[in-house]
Amino acid sequence: MKYNTYLSSKNEYSLSKYHNLANQLKADGHHVINLTTGDPIERTYPEAYKAMEESLTNRKISQYPSFKGKVSLRQSIADWAQRNHKIEFNPDTQVCSTNGSKEAVFHLALLFDWSEGQEIWAPSLSYPVYASSAGLFNIPFRELPVSRETNFLPDLDTISANDWHKCQMFWINSPHNPTSAIASKDYLQKLLKLAEQYDFLVCSDECYNDIFYKDLPSSILDFPESQNWLCIRSLSKRSHMTGFRSGALLSQNTELMKKILLMRPALGVGTPDFIQDAAIAAWNDDQHPKQFSEEYKIKQKIIREALESKGFEIFGGDASFYLWFSHPQFSSSEQLMELFIEQHLVLTPGTAFGKDGEGFIRMVYCSTLNQCEEIAKRIQSLNIKGPS
Ligand SMILES: Cc1ncc(COP(=O)(O)O)c(C=O)c1O
């Protein structure tokens, strides 16, 4: 047998390495706090469980779910978009349910013809699934350099017209995992102009947009006049529903959505009906993400103050539940990892997201308040001499 060559170039999904490390420390009897995964440990939106229980109680026969989501779910997603972003979607032709956003992110490349050498583009620091999708489907993948100087967003002005012609899918994720950077409305506008000029799709991965601490982050949904975007949303972070696996694809480009609806039946990704019912409850409520954001704001403050008192330089932090930081006394992510592991805090090295993450480290703070206080205490005990 001849295996997919991408699999031999990759031994391990990069983040799972650090999960294993956390498990090993735990097995050795340490009180480890694992801050590697954006998987909220506090209450899931309670009405979602209620709706699911009701849905299950009334059910006597289990049948295949609709792959694109039942009408009532698609309607609730369209209503949510209308209330929050003042944009109209036809729930029949412009909205599709997904099993969380990850599978949708992964499968999206199947939409296009890649035979003429077109490429998938993503920031050099990114959620790893953009690259693994391209790798497993054997599609050319281009990493666009990002740095603190570019606010961790690709510099659109440095790309030549020749290169723009090669782009077919452009991944943008704002608020950004891992850095929490936010693309401004002007940035998105400029990107969409380029997408129209060079005929590519802006794939806007927006799973963190509803967790924010200042202004509502700009969204691709704020550009109803453009046909060149697909918006990918999720209940995972917004409603603490990572275990439900529920998300949505939205676009006003009816031709694109037609192709998506043609592609997805083959994938076997219809969301079970009782989860769709839970999802409807979550999309119908705009208050709980605001409440969650209020709570995260307090947690972030506790941790941020501790980090700053030890001389860390923190970037972003106005949305999502990630802190991205560096320290003038430590040039490598590995060194930073070791520093935190001494206190049994397991973080994620910036390099897990791409080579431009060297010297940075990411901390997740979707923990309990008590745990955040404990994390702050351990940060105070880090072996650093104080502000430098
Ligand atoms: C940027 C980004 N996109 C997509 C996902 C997938 O989320 P889900 O499949 O739970 O919706 C994640 C999860 O951490 C993420 O960070």
Image: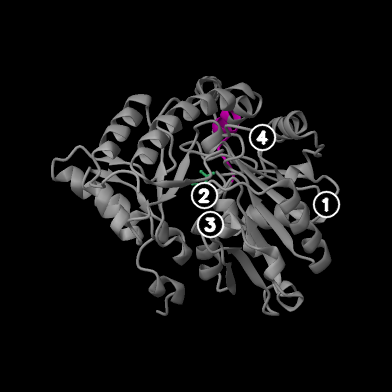
Q: Name the mark on residue 148.
A: 3
| Image mark for residue 289 | none
Residue identifier under label 2 = 177
Q: Secondary structure at mark 2?
A: loop
Which residue, as the protein is rendered here, is positioned at the far front? Answer: 388
Where is the N terminus found, in terms of image quarters?
bottom left
- Residue 315, percent from left and from top: 50, 47
The residue carrying mark 4 is 216
Q: Position of residue 153 (x, y in %)?
A: 61, 57
* Residue at the disc numbered 1: 226
| Nearer-N-terminus badge (3/1) | 3
- Residue at 41%, 27% (x, y): give it: 42
Q: Is residue 380 above or below residue 120?
A: above
**Extent of the magenta region:** 270-278
Q: Secondary structure at mark 3?
A: helix
- Characterize the magenta stretch by its predominant secondary structure: helix
Q: Amino acid at mark 4?
A: Leu
Near mark 3 (Cα within 10 A), the count class, few <14, some 14-19 or many ≥20, is few
Give the number of the mark in front: 2 or 1: 2
Instruction: Indicate the secondary structure of the residue bearing disc 1.
Output: loop
Question: Mark 3 or mark 2, which is nearer to you?
Answer: 3
Looking at marks 4 and 2 on the same chain, the residue that comes earlier in the sequence is marked by 2
* Dot placed on the residue nearer the N-terminal end, 2 or 1: 2
Does the magenta portion include 271? yes
Question: Which residue appears at 76% of the width and 75% of the height?
Answer: 161
Q: Amino acid at mark 1?
A: Ser
Rounded to the nearest angstrom, the CA distance separating label 4 from label 1 is: 20 Å
